[in-house]
Amino acid sequence: MNSGKAAPEGLELAVELLRSSYLPVVSTGAGMSRESGVRTFRGEEGYWREHRAEDLASLEGIRKDPVLVWEWYRERLGACEELIPHKGYEALYRLQEHSGRLPVVTQNVDGLHQKAGIRDVIELHGSLRTASCLAGCGAPPVRMEQGLFENMPPRCVCGSILRPDVVLFGEDLPEQALKRALRLAGRCDLMIVVGTSMVVYPAAALPMIALRSGARVIEINTVETPLSSLEGTLFLRGTAGSVLPELAKAVIRSC
Ligand code: BV8
């Protein structure tokens, strides 16, 4: 394998699985964005090392300390605006072009998949594109941009605090997105799971549903997760930005 790096163990089998798959689905978590400069949520440099998840991404959190939560989102939005999708996104784009159909279910809210031209992205946890009235006054969502933060916390025209249109802990996921993701998990014959710690539900249930339905799972992660050692999972140790391009190159070249 060129690029000077040995291909991760199992890559050849992964290529075989992907080439022979009739309905592959991709599922991504925060690790997919890591090499574009977005910090992950957990692990040694995770966002939430300083704060518990519930203190930031929850309705109680935003009601209790709206400025803290909005400062966190302002930092993330600022980071997102400069983000460039890394080679792993380009690899997904090329695989999607090559196979014609490769739905991508993501837990991420940074919009990087779409920025890379990837289509058919199912955002399970919403996005940082808009914010809405926390009191639900019915005013239309407003675009999330730096100007929104002139006054902290950002407020709705009705005077109530705004909340980012992401799925906060304790909130239901968008019905259509979840329904489609569950259907794909139950019908796919291969799920490529990239960069998730398999902690947050119901997103973490998707690969389990795929396995239970007889599908194979290819997991790409820098460390093992509860998914890695399950029957039917092929664990490829490595980063999204290095493994996905190897996988795409080998699959496309072999056809
Ligand atoms: C729900 C949007 C029904 C916001 C997010 C008590 C009360 C209420 C609910 C619960 C409860 N107890 C449990 C629950 C369920 C809860 C949950 O799962 N909690 C966890 C903490 C146990 N889930 C919910 O609340 C969901 N809603 O269940 O509704 C309900 C309603 C009421 C009551 C009960 C149930 C809503 C969950 C959505 C929360 N919103 N995001 C925002 O982004 O600001 S979650 C957020 O964290 C992300 O979206 C993502 O889902 C999650 C982070 O997980 P990962 O993506 O996996 O990222 P992480 O950092 O953890 O891991 C990164 C991985 O990448 C690591 O494995 C690392 O090794 C790897 N990696 C690092 N670098 C690389 C790499 N891999 C490859 N390449 C690299 N370079």
Image: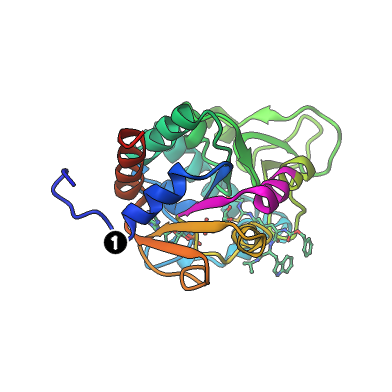
Q: Position of residue 78 (x, y in %)?
A: 45, 37
Task: Report x, y in % for residue 123.
Answer: 63, 41
For the residue marked with disc 1, what is the amino acid?
Answer: Glu
Magenta-drawn stretch contains 187? yes
Tell me where residue 144 appears, x and y as whole percent: 60, 32
Q: Quarter of the image containing the C terminus?
A: top left
Q: Residue at x 65, y 46 (%)?
A: 124
Residue 159 quadrant = top right
Q: Say how the picture is coloured.
A: rainbow
Q: Toward the viewer: 44 or 164?
A: 44
Q: Residue furthest right?
A: 137
Taking the image as drawn, is residue 160 in sight?
A: yes
Residue 215 lies left or right of residue 244; in this view the side is right
Please rate how many residues cluster around mark 1, counting C-alpha atoms within 10 Å: few if below 14, some from 14 to 19, many from 20. few
Asked if residue 83 shows in the view, the reply is no
Residue, x 75% and y 34% (percent of image)?
156
Tell me the magenta residue range: 180-194
- 201 is higher (above) or lower (below) than 95: below
Residue 90 belongs to magenta span: no
Whether residue 189 sits left or right of residue 174 in the image: it is left
Toward the viewer: 19 or 126?
A: 19
Horizontal side of residue 205 vs 232, given as left or right = right
Q: Secondary structure at mark 1?
A: loop
How many numbered callouts? 1
Q: Residue at x 50, y 30 (%)?
A: 118
On the image, numbered disc 1 is attached to which residue? 9
| Residue at point 28%, 58% (across, down) | 8
- Dividing the image into four quarters, tell me where ligand 1 lies: bottom right
Foreground residue among 13 and 235: 13
Can you give x and y, in whole percent of width and height, for residue 222 in the image? Answer: 35, 62
